[in-house]
Amino acid sequence: MEVSCKILRRSTHSFLQNYHYFTSTAALLAFPFSASVLLSQAFVPSPSSLLPQIYDRLRTLFDAAGFPSSKLFALLNLKVSQTITSSIFALPFTLTLLLIAKASIIHALNHHKLSLPPSFNSIYSLYKPLLHTYIFNCFLILSANATAFGLMFLAFSFIDKLGYSSPGSIVLFMSISGAVLFSVILANALVICNMALALSGMEGHGGYLAILKACFLLRGRTSMALFLALPVNVALAAIEALFQFRVVRPYRMAGIARPFVALEGIFIAYLYSIFIILDTIVSCMFYKSLKMGSWIGEEEKHFFRIEFPDEDKYGYMVSKEVP
């Protein structure tokens, strides 16, 4: 807990140290992504959106897998459908401006004080490994979801063979356990993805090796990573709820977007961008803390280091024992 608080304080100090750069250049780069995520929540409930189609496909898949028809799985289906829809809606901005914003943040953290805006070449050199890692992160997230649903399928198939397919306490317990298992697996996958992106930007190498090295760095420190990710994610969820209450709700009631409501929506999207920047800074500071190893115990002096190959080739992995 003490180390986590130090990382949060260090992240806040770094944000304030380059406050003008982070709140202008980086925030404006991340703004289209933030606006697309928030606006997707206003459009997904419409019948013409992708949400009903994805929801029906997932419900059919759940029924075919033998999942019980409960409110818990209906809510899980709805949340997964909304996440998929928002991800598709924001994907163009994610692959471009969001990764460029992360590259600019990492560049600022590496150079501490920016007297001049970063050059295009410096940002592009960081953008390439971030893009490679993000693509592999998508496969990791898909694998995590498939693993969670696969385990739930095996569990419900097992209790169905035992004759507990009818609603009861066992089925309810298995449903709650399945939802918790899904949340734990997905949370760990997201933490690994964030660390892999930070590692790619800080070291200038991306791809699946960045994910492998992130898994190694987080070994035994997953709870700390989850604790560090909790404040920012709670803040982002609160901002999404604020957008729903202050922008989406008045728009649906009035049928038009009033000027003051639109301005308030722009401010909320800008605030969302600020917390995305803070999330990136926290991930980078956490990586630096793990890389320095200043708080690693004596029993962990011997470990394996994954080294990236030179010249941006992603086909080799070298393991060495560090004394």
Image: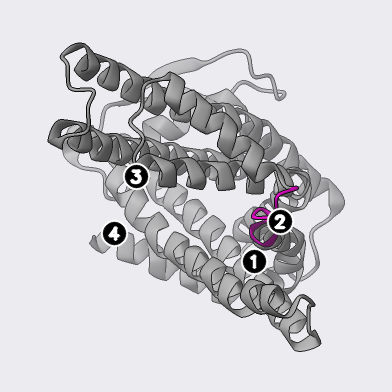
Amino acid identity at mark 1: Ser
Amino acid identity at mark 2: Ala
User: Which secondary structure lies at badge 3?
Assistant: helix
The residue to which callout 4 is attached is 3
User: Contact, CB < 8 Å: mark 2 with mark 1?
Assistant: yes
Q: Earlier in the sequence, mark 2 or mark 1?
A: 2
Which residues, given as a range, are shown in magenta? 40-48
Q: Residues within 10 Å of mark 4 (few under 14, many from 20)?
A: few
Amino acid identity at mark 3: Leu
Q: How is the image coloured?
A: one colour
Residue found at x 76% / y 79%:
262
Q: Earlier in the sequence, mark 2 or mark 3?
A: 3
Rounded to the nearest whole Å, what is the CA distance between mark 1 and mark 4?
Answer: 26 Å
Q: Is residue 205 visible?
A: no
Residue found at x 61% / y 20%:
309
User: Which secondary structure lies at badge 1?
Assistant: helix
The residue to which callout 1 is attached is 273
Amino acid identity at mark 4: Val
The residue to which callout 3 is attached is 72
Measured as percent of width and height from the top left, residue 22 is found at: 66, 70
Q: Relative to 280, is 67 on the left or the right?
A: left
